[in-house]
């Protein structure tokens, strides 16, 4: 990985969602985590994101939640934010995509579309994904290999692909019926999931759950997570390691890469590891 790669942030814009997926990390935590939400206007947020621009230049912001599209004035905020930074949004696609494509430049904003079959209607989802595609946005769908949903992977893959939408899988990290995943996937399930996961690092850290502890990592230095209350942490695995507060004038990151202090790196944050191939 490129040690000089450009900086990026994950921004948990708020811990609120209009879905209640049983596999969601927040499933039992919504009321508690929701108390941390702060609701600022686009003007107020821009003050903070301009401070980042002045300090680090134009960076990439990966917005997640909860569901970002239900944050007040979200589309206006994205329009303003993408005038100085590049933006990626993870969404369940329940939002107003028609207005979004009219207001937002696909050269500056990407979306990760997550299909949650218990709450989203597949035909509505596809209609919106095609609106995005026609407007110049990349619009592949991601589906979670959650044990009770695995039997429908091929059905959904075919349905999406027949409609011209790329299909990818994410491995499930969590417990189902007393078993811990991804460790409890059978070999057959692993072989089935593997082609949809992408690069080898993703398989090592995402599917096999190899420990990154001790590896030098850019998390906290060239990457950080901004939580809904402004707390800045190295990555999702180290929530107690606060570096600073995004809303403070003296907001800062680490001065250098530091060794990983976690045993798992289940999301895509493993790309920050400076491993032996560098
Ligand atoms: S849509 Fe995403 S954030 Fe909302 S409940 Fe489902 S997994 Fe959680
Ligand atoms: S390797 Fe993963 S868990 Fe460890 S510090 Fe880096 S991003 Fe965090």
Image: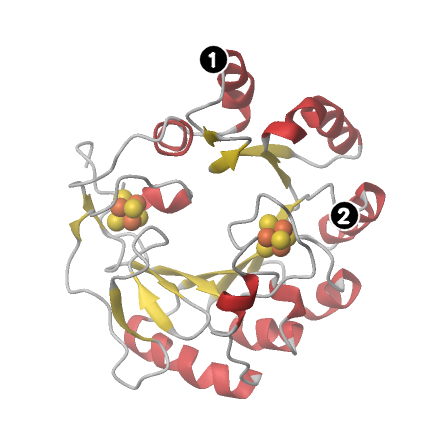
Q: Is residue 179 above or below residue 259?
A: above
Classify residue 32 as left or right of residue 122.
left
Q: Earlier in the sequence, mark 2 or mark 1?
A: 2
Q: Nearer the viewer, residue 16 or 70?
A: 16
* Residue 14 seen from this side: no
Q: How is the image coloured?
A: secondary structure
Q: Which residue is mark 2?
A: 120
C-alpha span from label 2 to label 1: 30 Å
Look at the picture and state if 197 lies above or below 98: above
How many residues crowd mark 2 within 10 Å: few (<14), some (14–19), many (20+)? some
Quarter of image, res 93: bottom right
| Disc 1 secondary structure class | helix
- The single residue placed furthest to the front in the displayed view is 178
Q: Residue at x 19, y 64 (%)?
A: 254
- Find numbered disc 2 in the image and state the secondary structure of the residue it sits on: loop
Residue 100 appears in which quarter of the rendering?
Answer: bottom right
Residue at 41% x, 43% y: name it. 268
Q: Which residue is mark 1?
A: 187
Going 77% across and 68% down the picture, which residue do you hit? Answer: 99
Q: Does residue 233 appear left or right of residue 124 in this picture? A: left
Mark 1 residue crowding within 10 angstroms, few (<14) / some (14–19) / many (20+):
few
């Amino acid at each position: 990985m490129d040690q000089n790669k450009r900086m990026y942030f994950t921004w948990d814009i708020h811990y609120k969602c209009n879905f209640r997926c049983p596999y969601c990390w927040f499933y039992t935590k919504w009321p508690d985590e929701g108390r941390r939400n702060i609701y600022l206007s686009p003007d107020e947020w821009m003050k903070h994101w301009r401070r980042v621009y002045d300090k680090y230049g134009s960076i990439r912001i990966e917005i997640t939640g909860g569901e970002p599209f239900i944050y007040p004035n979200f589309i206006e905020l994205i329009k303003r934010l993408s005038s100085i930074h590049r933006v990626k949004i993870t969404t369940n696609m329940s939002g107003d995509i028609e207005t979004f494509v009219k207001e937002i430049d696909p050269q500056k904003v990407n979306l990760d579309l997550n299909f949650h079959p218990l709450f989203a209607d597949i035909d509505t989802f596809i209609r919106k994904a095609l609106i995005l595609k026609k407007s110049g946005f990349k619009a592949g769908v991601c589906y979670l290999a959650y044990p009770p949903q695995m039997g429908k992977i091929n059905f959904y893959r075919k349905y999406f692909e027949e409609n011209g939408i790329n299909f990818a899988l994410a491995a499930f990290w969590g417990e189902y019926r007393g078993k811990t995943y991804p460790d409890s996937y059978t070999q057959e399930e692993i072989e089935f999931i593997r082609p949809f996961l992408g690069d080898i690092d993703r398989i090592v850290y995402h599917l096999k759950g190899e420990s990154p502890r001790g590896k030098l990592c850019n998390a906290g230095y060239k990457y950080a997570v901004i939580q809904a209350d402004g707390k800045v942490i190295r990555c999702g695995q180290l929530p107690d390691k606060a570096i600073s507060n995004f809303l403070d004038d003296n907001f800062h990151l680490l001065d250098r890469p530091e060794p990983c202090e976690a045993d798992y790196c289940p999301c895509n944050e493993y790309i920050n590891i400076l491993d032996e191939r560098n």
